[in-house]
């Protein structure tokens, strides 16, 4: 019997046949048995103390954890040069590993599967974040013109990165390998490699940011080489069935774009078919970095070729609502659906969806602050909202994306 995630209440049925909504059906993700199809995705929150996860993270993540659910941590730095945002935690020192353990325990006590996202920002950094004030690194010395980097004195233009020498790449691969091993040591069930949104892995993939002339640049096969080396090393270290990877084929965030994304990602996903990964996580065009793009119905069509190319578990992210999420599962568009901002603001989102209950609105101004409570752990649960039982239902959530 399917139940409302996070409760022991039977899930409501829908339609004339009284079937369980697709989002509340179970799914076997390789070695992991999931009770429902809703995923809490990686969301940067900047609540660390420098690069150390803080105790409030235990409350934040466990609030959003459900029995049989999948939770993916915020992007977590793989090494000293991996950072480019303030107060983002890392996973490359003993202190960092120990700091994550209480949060992992809290999430797993709720019955969730917990993956850590491994993140190297690449060229999206600043000397202030780099060892010895060095320049950020990337596949090519191409400066990001889209947006600004946030440093202690305020917003600043992105500097021109230093192009990595080929001899440096094995060391970065090893950083990812070690970070994955550390995540498992901290108790995580698996890791997700951040290969999206204009960061290091994406820098190598996209033609706009990779203009190398060696075997790591030029052709689709060459631009895919470094990402695949990272992926294989991590899979070799912790087991492929504990590894996922996130891509943004139609990105654009941080100037990351490709001249032929369908060809690039079709090739890349076909290389992954025989690896036995836990999943591939695709960001749809509606979400570019931390902003919304065009209409979801149109953007959803754009990842269709990738559904055909990849035979394993596919997570889709991109402004989904209760209705569009159920439709995506029912149609086979994706196997699992990530809900970011809606779940951030509604720690009991699955329950609210099931009951057709009102949704809290998210407060964008609190997304990336150091406050350990406001906008982090203080979003109210349904039973804490006065008059919620009498309010007009608005569980779709579509109206809340337009702020």
Image (cartoon, rainbow, N blue to C red):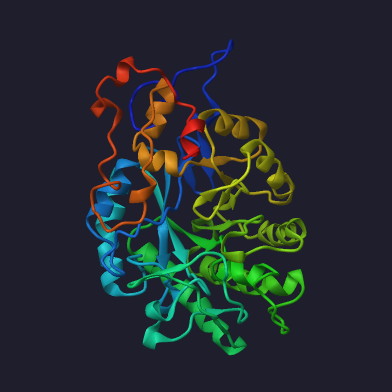
Give the answer, above or below, for where 7 lies relative to 104.
Answer: above
Residue 210 shows up from this direction: yes
Quarter of the image for residue 131 reads bottom left
Residue at the image position 42 percent from the left and 53 percent from the top: 43
Along the viewing direction, whichever of 81 and 39 lies nearer the viewer: 81
Give the answer, above or below, for where 148 lies relative to 134.
Answer: above
Quarter of the image for residue 336 reads top right
Q: Residue furthest top?
A: 16
Q: Position of residue 367 (x, y in %)?
A: 36, 51
| Total residue callouts | 0
Q: Position of residue 270 (x, y in %)?
A: 72, 58
Query: Going by the image, does 86 lie left or right of 20?
Result: left
Give the answer, above or below, for where 251 lies relative to 395.
Answer: below
Query: Going by the image, does 388 lie left or right of 294?
Result: left
Residue at the image position 74 percent from the left and 48 percent from the top: 305
Residue 4 shows up from this direction: no
Q: Position of residue 16 (x, y in %)?
A: 58, 10
Give the answer, above or below, for where 195 lies relative to 303.
Answer: below
Quarter of the image for residue 91 reads bottom left
Quarter of the figure that contains the N terminus:
top left
Residue at the image position 28 percent from the left and 45 percent from the top: 109
Residue at the image position 25 percent from the left and 47 percent from the top: 374
Q: Position of residue 211 (x, y in %)?
A: 70, 78
């Amino acid at each position: 019997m399917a139940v409302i995630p996070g409760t022991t209440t039977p899930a409501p049925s829908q339609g004339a046949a009284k079937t369980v909504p697709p989002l509340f059906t179970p799914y076997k993700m390789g070695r992991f048995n999931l009770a429902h199809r809703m995923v809490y995705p990686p969301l940067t929150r900047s609540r660390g103390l420098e690069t150390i996860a803080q105790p409030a993270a235990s409350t934040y993540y466990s609030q959003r954890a459900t029995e049989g659910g999948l939770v993916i941590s915020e992007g977590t730095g793989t090494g000293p040069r991996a950072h480019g945002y303030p107060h983002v935690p890392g996973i490359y020192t003993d202190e960092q590993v120990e700091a994550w353990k209480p949060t992992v325990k809290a999430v797993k006590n709720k019955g969730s599967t917990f993956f850590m996202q491994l993140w190297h920002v690449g060229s999206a950094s600043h000397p202030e974040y780099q060892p010895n004030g060095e320049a950020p690194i990337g596949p090519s010395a191409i400066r990001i013109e889209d947006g600004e980097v946030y440093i202690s004195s305020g917003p600043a233009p992105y500097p021109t990165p230093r192009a990595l020498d080929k001899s440096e790449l094995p060391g970065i691969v090893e950083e990812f390998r070690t970070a994955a091993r550390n995540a498992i040591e901290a108790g995580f069930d698996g890791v997700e490699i951040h290969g999206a949104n204009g960061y290091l892995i994406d820098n190598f993939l996209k033609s706009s940011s990779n203009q190398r002339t060696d075997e790591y640049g030029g052709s689709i096969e060459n631009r895919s080489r470094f990402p695949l080396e990272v992926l294989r090393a991590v899979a070799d270290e912790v087991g492929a069935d504990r590894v996922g990877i996130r891509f943004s084929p139609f990105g654009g965030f941080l100037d990351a774009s490709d001249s032929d994304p369908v060809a690039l990602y079709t090739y890349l996903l076909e290389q992954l078919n025989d690896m036995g990964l836990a999943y591939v996580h695709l960001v749809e065009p509606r979400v570019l970095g931390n902003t919304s793009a065009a209409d979801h119905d149109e953007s959803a069509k754009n990842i269709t070729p990738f559904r055909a190319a990849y035979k394993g578990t596919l997570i889709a992210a991109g402004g989904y609502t209760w209705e569009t999420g159920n439709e995506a599962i029912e149609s086979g568009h994706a196997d699992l659906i990530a809900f970011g901002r809606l779940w951030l603001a509604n720690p009991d989102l699955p329950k609210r969806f099931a009951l057709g209950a009102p949704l809290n609105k998210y407060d964008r101004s609190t997304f990336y602050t150091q406050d350990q409570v406001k906008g982090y752990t203080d979003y109210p649960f349904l039973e804490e909202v006065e008059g919620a039982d009498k309010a007009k239902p608005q569980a779709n959530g579509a109206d809340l994306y337009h702020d």
